[in-house]
Protein backbone atom coordinates (compact mmCIF):
# COMPACT_ATOMS: atom_id res chain seq x y z
CA UNK A 1 0.00 0.00 0.00
CA UNK A 2 1.42 3.32 -1.06
CA UNK A 3 -1.17 5.61 0.52
CA UNK A 4 -4.37 5.53 2.60
CA UNK A 5 -6.89 8.27 1.86
CA UNK A 6 -9.53 8.86 4.55
CA UNK A 7 -12.78 10.62 3.81
CA UNK A 8 -12.21 14.32 4.57
CA UNK A 9 -15.15 14.44 7.04
CA UNK A 10 -14.04 11.40 9.06
CA UNK A 11 -13.48 12.02 12.76
CA UNK A 12 -11.88 9.16 14.70
CA UNK A 13 -13.80 10.02 17.90
CA UNK A 14 -17.09 9.57 16.08
CA UNK A 15 -17.95 6.81 13.66
CA UNK A 16 -19.37 8.91 10.85
CA UNK A 17 -17.85 8.95 7.33
CA UNK A 18 -15.73 5.92 8.30
CA UNK A 19 -14.45 5.09 4.84
CA UNK A 20 -11.05 5.24 3.17
CA UNK A 21 -9.35 4.31 -0.08
CA UNK A 22 -5.95 2.71 -0.52
CA UNK A 23 -3.58 3.45 -3.35
CA UNK A 24 -1.58 0.36 -4.18
CA UNK A 25 2.18 0.59 -4.62
CA UNK A 26 2.01 -1.99 -7.42
CA UNK A 27 -0.76 -2.57 -9.98
CA UNK A 28 -3.26 -5.26 -9.00
CA UNK A 29 -3.12 -8.26 -11.33
CA UNK A 30 -6.57 -9.78 -11.74
CA UNK A 31 -6.81 -13.55 -11.70
CA UNK A 32 -9.25 -16.35 -10.96
CA UNK A 33 -9.14 -15.40 -7.26
CA UNK A 34 -8.51 -11.63 -7.50
CA UNK A 35 -11.36 -9.78 -9.18
CA UNK A 36 -12.78 -6.27 -9.13
CA UNK A 37 -16.00 -5.60 -7.23
CA UNK A 38 -18.72 -3.19 -8.23
CA UNK A 39 -19.79 -0.39 -5.89
CA UNK A 40 -23.40 -0.26 -4.74
CA UNK A 41 -24.95 2.88 -6.21
CA UNK A 42 -28.62 2.59 -5.23
CA UNK A 43 -29.78 5.03 -2.54
CA UNK A 44 -31.52 2.19 -0.65
CA UNK A 45 -29.96 -1.10 0.34
CA UNK A 46 -33.15 -3.06 -0.70
CA UNK A 47 -31.58 -6.42 0.18
CA UNK A 48 -32.15 -8.52 3.29
CA UNK A 49 -28.81 -10.30 3.64
CA UNK A 50 -25.15 -9.64 2.88
CA UNK A 51 -21.81 -11.43 2.92
CA UNK A 52 -19.14 -10.00 5.20
CA UNK A 53 -15.50 -11.00 4.79
CA UNK A 54 -12.35 -10.24 6.73
CA UNK A 55 -9.25 -11.40 8.55
CA UNK A 56 -10.37 -10.20 12.00
CA UNK A 57 -10.62 -12.07 15.29
CA UNK A 58 -12.58 -15.31 15.11
CA UNK A 59 -13.82 -15.00 18.72
CA UNK A 60 -14.14 -12.10 21.14
CA UNK A 61 -10.80 -12.90 22.81
CA UNK A 62 -9.26 -14.81 19.92
CA UNK A 63 -6.61 -14.15 17.34
CA UNK A 64 -6.80 -12.68 13.84
CA UNK A 65 -7.51 -15.23 11.14
CA UNK A 66 -4.78 -16.15 8.67
CA UNK A 67 -7.49 -17.34 6.28
CA UNK A 68 -10.13 -15.00 4.84
CA UNK A 69 -13.36 -15.57 6.76
CA UNK A 70 -16.86 -15.21 5.28
CA UNK A 71 -20.22 -14.92 7.03
CA UNK A 72 -23.79 -14.31 5.87
CA UNK A 73 -25.49 -11.54 7.86
CA UNK A 74 -28.85 -9.77 7.93
CA UNK A 75 -29.76 -6.12 7.37
CA UNK A 76 -31.32 -4.90 10.64
CA UNK A 77 -33.13 -1.70 11.54
CA UNK A 78 -31.12 1.34 12.59
CA UNK A 79 -33.22 1.42 15.76
CA UNK A 80 -31.81 -2.00 16.66
CA UNK A 81 -28.22 -0.75 16.35
CA UNK A 82 -29.01 2.47 18.22
CA UNK A 83 -30.25 0.37 21.13
CA UNK A 84 -27.22 -1.93 21.34
CA UNK A 85 -24.21 0.14 20.25
CA UNK A 86 -22.05 2.74 22.01
CA UNK A 87 -23.95 6.07 21.97
CA UNK A 88 -20.74 8.07 22.47
CA UNK A 89 -19.70 7.08 18.95
CA UNK A 90 -23.01 8.23 17.48
CA UNK A 91 -24.01 11.62 18.84
CA UNK A 92 -26.35 12.09 15.84
CA UNK A 93 -27.74 8.55 16.04
CA UNK A 94 -27.22 6.12 13.18
CA UNK A 95 -26.90 8.24 10.02
CA UNK A 96 -28.30 7.66 6.54
CA UNK A 97 -24.72 6.87 5.45
CA UNK A 98 -24.63 3.90 7.82
CA UNK A 99 -26.14 0.43 7.89
CA UNK A 100 -27.09 -1.79 10.81
CA UNK A 101 -26.08 -5.38 10.08
CA UNK A 102 -26.04 -8.46 12.29
CA UNK A 103 -27.56 -11.89 12.66
CA UNK A 104 -31.22 -12.53 13.38
CA UNK A 105 -30.28 -16.06 14.47
CA UNK A 106 -27.39 -14.76 16.57
CA UNK A 107 -23.78 -15.81 17.09
CA UNK A 108 -22.57 -14.50 13.69
CA UNK A 109 -20.76 -11.19 13.32
CA UNK A 110 -17.67 -9.34 12.20
CA UNK A 111 -15.06 -8.67 14.85
CA UNK A 112 -12.04 -6.57 15.77
CA UNK A 113 -9.62 -6.51 12.85
CA UNK A 114 -12.39 -6.65 10.24
CA UNK A 115 -12.76 -2.85 10.10
CA UNK A 116 -12.50 -1.64 6.52
CA UNK A 117 -13.47 -5.02 5.11
CA UNK A 118 -16.30 -5.20 2.57
CA UNK A 119 -19.90 -6.20 3.09
CA UNK A 120 -21.05 -7.54 -0.25
CA UNK A 121 -24.12 -8.64 -2.14
CA UNK A 122 -23.98 -11.29 -4.85
CA UNK A 123 -26.38 -10.03 -7.52
CA UNK A 124 -25.63 -12.31 -10.44
CA UNK A 125 -24.63 -15.86 -9.50
CA UNK A 126 -23.73 -16.85 -13.07
CA UNK A 127 -21.23 -14.04 -13.49
CA UNK A 128 -20.16 -14.13 -9.83
CA UNK A 129 -20.46 -10.35 -9.60
CA UNK A 130 -20.28 -8.95 -6.10
CA UNK A 131 -21.35 -5.43 -5.23
CA UNK A 132 -19.79 -3.75 -2.19
CA UNK A 133 -22.77 -2.50 -0.19
CA UNK A 134 -20.82 -1.36 2.85
CA UNK A 135 -17.59 -1.29 4.81
CA UNK A 136 -17.17 -2.75 8.30
CA UNK A 137 -16.99 0.16 10.75
CA UNK A 138 -17.72 -0.41 14.45
CA UNK A 139 -19.37 -2.99 16.67
CA UNK A 140 -19.77 -3.91 20.30
CA UNK A 141 -19.47 -7.67 20.67
CA UNK A 142 -18.19 -10.35 18.33
CA UNK A 143 -21.04 -12.75 17.67
CA UNK A 144 -22.37 -12.76 21.23
CA UNK A 145 -26.13 -13.24 21.24
CA UNK A 146 -28.00 -11.27 18.60
CA UNK A 147 -25.11 -8.88 18.09
CA UNK A 148 -25.07 -6.19 15.46
CA UNK A 149 -22.59 -3.68 14.14
CA UNK A 150 -22.48 -0.44 12.20
CA UNK A 151 -21.25 -0.44 8.62
CA UNK A 152 -20.56 2.50 6.33
CA UNK A 153 -23.06 2.49 3.44
CA UNK A 154 -21.02 2.87 0.22
CA UNK A 155 -23.64 4.46 -2.08
CA UNK A 156 -23.50 7.97 -0.55
CA UNK A 157 -19.71 7.99 -1.07
CA UNK A 158 -19.53 6.84 -4.71
CA UNK A 159 -19.08 10.40 -6.01
CA UNK A 160 -16.19 11.02 -3.53
CA UNK A 161 -14.64 7.65 -4.45
CA UNK A 162 -14.82 8.38 -8.18
CA UNK A 163 -13.45 11.92 -7.78
CA UNK A 164 -10.59 10.64 -5.62
CA UNK A 165 -9.72 7.74 -7.93
CA UNK A 166 -10.34 9.31 -11.33
CA UNK A 167 -9.87 13.02 -10.54
CA UNK A 168 -12.27 15.94 -11.05
Image: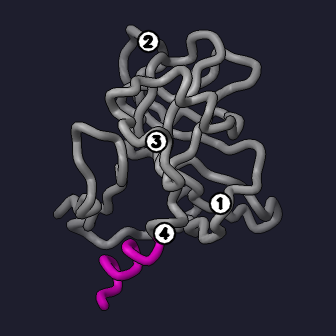
Q: Is residue 117 above or below residue 7?
A: above
Marks 4 & 2, CB-CB < 8 Å contact: no
Q: Which residue is mark 1?
A: 130
Q: Is residue 98 above or below residue 107?
A: below
In whole angstroms, how far apart are the C-alphas of marks 3 and 1?
Answer: 16 Å
Q: Residue at x 34, y 33 (%)?
A: 89
Height in image: 145 above or below 99? above
Residue 139: percent from the left, percent from the top? 45, 27
Asked whether 120 or 13 is in front, the reply is 13
- Disc marking residue 136: 3
Q: State the quadrant of the C terminus.
A: bottom left
Front: mark 4 or 2: 2
Characterize the local packing of mark 1: few (<14), some (14-19) or many (20 or more) Cα atoms within 10 angstroms. Answer: many
Q: Earlier in the sequence, mark 2 or mark 1?
A: 2
Q: Secondary structure at mark 4?
A: loop
State which tag comes first along the sequence, 4 or 3. 4
Mark whose residue sits in front, 1 or 4: 1
How far is disc 3 from disc 2 in space, using C-alphas?
16 Å
Cα distance in 3D space between marks 4 and 3: 24 Å
In this rendering, the label closer to the viewer, 2 or 1: 2
Quadrant location, the N terminus: bottom left
Frontmost of labels 3 and 1 is: 3
Residue 166, relative to residue 27: is it above or below? below
53 or 99: which is nearer to us?
A: 99
Identity of the residue drawn at 61% across and 51% down: 120
* Residue 30: mark: 4
Q: Are marks 1 and 4 in contact (CB under 8 Å)?
A: no
Amino acid sequence: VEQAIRHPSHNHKRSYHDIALVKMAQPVIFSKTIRPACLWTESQENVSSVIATGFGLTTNNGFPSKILQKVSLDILTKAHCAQYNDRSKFNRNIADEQLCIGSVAGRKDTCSGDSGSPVQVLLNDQECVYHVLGVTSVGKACGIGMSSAIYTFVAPYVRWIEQTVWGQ
